[in-house]
Image (cartoon, grey):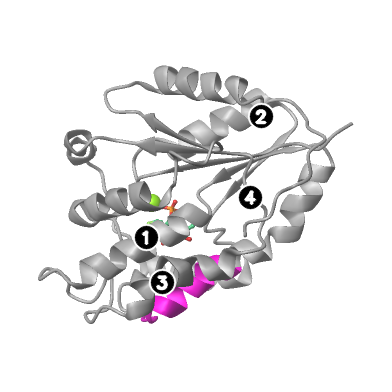
């Protein structure tokens, strides 16, 4: 028996990511759904405080490194699950890590930034994709990444933003362009964009399943787990 596959669902806030990850896990049977940030771990608790309490301060670099550290907390568990034949579905992972930090760099330079979303002086590291990527090197690379994207009109229509840090429409637009800049979907065959604009839950599930079958990530594999390099 081969190993299970690692499938990542990335996307903008309110793109239906969490709903679709849960449906996919269900459809794959022997599977485990993991969500990042995982707010239950020791590092996750600090991240949760940062996201929910706007007066809790961390420098942009510190926040970035904590999100990566939170992934490292689950590194062994992910590898063990895959080797035990489980399909592991991730709701956010490394691309969120890079895209949100890069977006903070851009947002730092806008007049509207009050210092809550990003520091008011842009830090050089946050604009440096190599630096941002560094701490995630060595983590398991997903066998398939699906990025759920929304056009900007739809993004504006999906009201119901919460009160967490980053949940601001204007910032989300910058996050979208950061994702598109770093995903490398044209060269990397393991990365696919799924435009969910104007689609209902069932339609998005069908689109995702089409890609999953085409990429054969619904079957166990003999391939080794790849590491991000
Ligand atoms: N987020 C998430 C980051 O900024 N970096 C990361 O590495 C990850 C995994 O945390 F705004 C952001 C994305 C989002 C916030 O995520 C909380 P959820 O999915 O809304 O819980
Ligand atoms: Mg959110």
Residue 155, image quadrant = top left
Q: How far separated are the C-alphas under marks 4 and 2?
A: 13 Å
Where does label 2 land, which residue? 217
Horizontally, is 25 left or right of 173 in the view? right
Give the CA distance from mark 4 to mark 3. Answer: 27 Å
Q: Give the mark nearer the N terminus: 1 vs 4.
A: 1
SS of the residue at dot 4? Answer: loop
Q: Are marks 3 and 1 in contact (CB under 8 Å)?
A: no
Q: Which residue is mark 4?
A: 141
Q: CA distance from mark 1 to mark 4?
A: 19 Å
Q: Circle 1 is placed at which residue position? A: 100
10 Å neighbourhood of mark 1: few (<14), some, or many (≥20)? many
Disc 3: residue Cβ within 8 A of ligand 1's nearest atom: no
Q: Is residue 186 magenta?
A: no
Marks 2 and 4: in contact by CB < 8 Å? Answer: no
The x and y percentages for residue 125 are: 38, 77
Residue density around tag 4, few if under 14, some if 14–19, many if 20 or more, within 10 Å: many
Between disc 3 and disc 1, the foreground one is: 1
Residue carrying label 3 = 50
Instruction: Kindly tell me whether mark 1's CB lies below 8 Å from ligand 1.
Output: yes
For label 2, being within 8 Å of ligand 1 is answered no
Task: Single out the residue that lies furthest toward the right.
Answer: 1
Provide the major secondary structure of the magenta segment.
Answer: helix
Measured Cα–Cα span from mark 3 to mark 1: 14 Å
Where on the picture, by quarter, is residue 127? bottom left
């Amino acid at each position: 028996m081969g190993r299970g596959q690692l499938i990542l669902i990335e996307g903008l806030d309110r793109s239906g990511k969490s709903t679709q990850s849960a449906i996919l896990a269900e459809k794959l049977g022997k599977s485990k759904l993991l969500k990042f940030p995982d707010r239950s771990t020791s590092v996750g608790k600090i991240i949760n405080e940062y996201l929910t309490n706007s007066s809790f301060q961390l420098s942009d670099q510190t926040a970035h490194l904590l999100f990566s550290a939170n992934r490292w907390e689950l590194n062994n568990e992910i590898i063990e699950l895959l080797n035990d034949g489980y399909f592991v579905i991730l709701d956010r992972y490394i691309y969120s890590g890079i895209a949100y930090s890069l977006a903070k760099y851009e947002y730092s330079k806008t007049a509207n930034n009050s210092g809550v979303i990003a520091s008011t002086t842009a830090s050089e590291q946050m604009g440096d994709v190599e630096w941002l990527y560094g701490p995630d090197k060595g983590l398991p690379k997903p066998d398939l990444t699906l990025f759920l994207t929304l056009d900007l009109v739809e993004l504006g229509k999906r009201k119901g933003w919460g009160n967490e840090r980053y949940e601001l429409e204007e910032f989300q637009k910058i996050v979208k362009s950061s994702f598109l800049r770093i995903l490398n979907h044209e060269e990397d065959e393991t990365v696919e964009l799924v435009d969910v604009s104007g689609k209902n839950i069932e339609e998005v599930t069908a689109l995702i399943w089409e890609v999953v079958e085409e990429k054969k990530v619904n079957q166990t594999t003999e391939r080794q787990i790849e590491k991000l390099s």
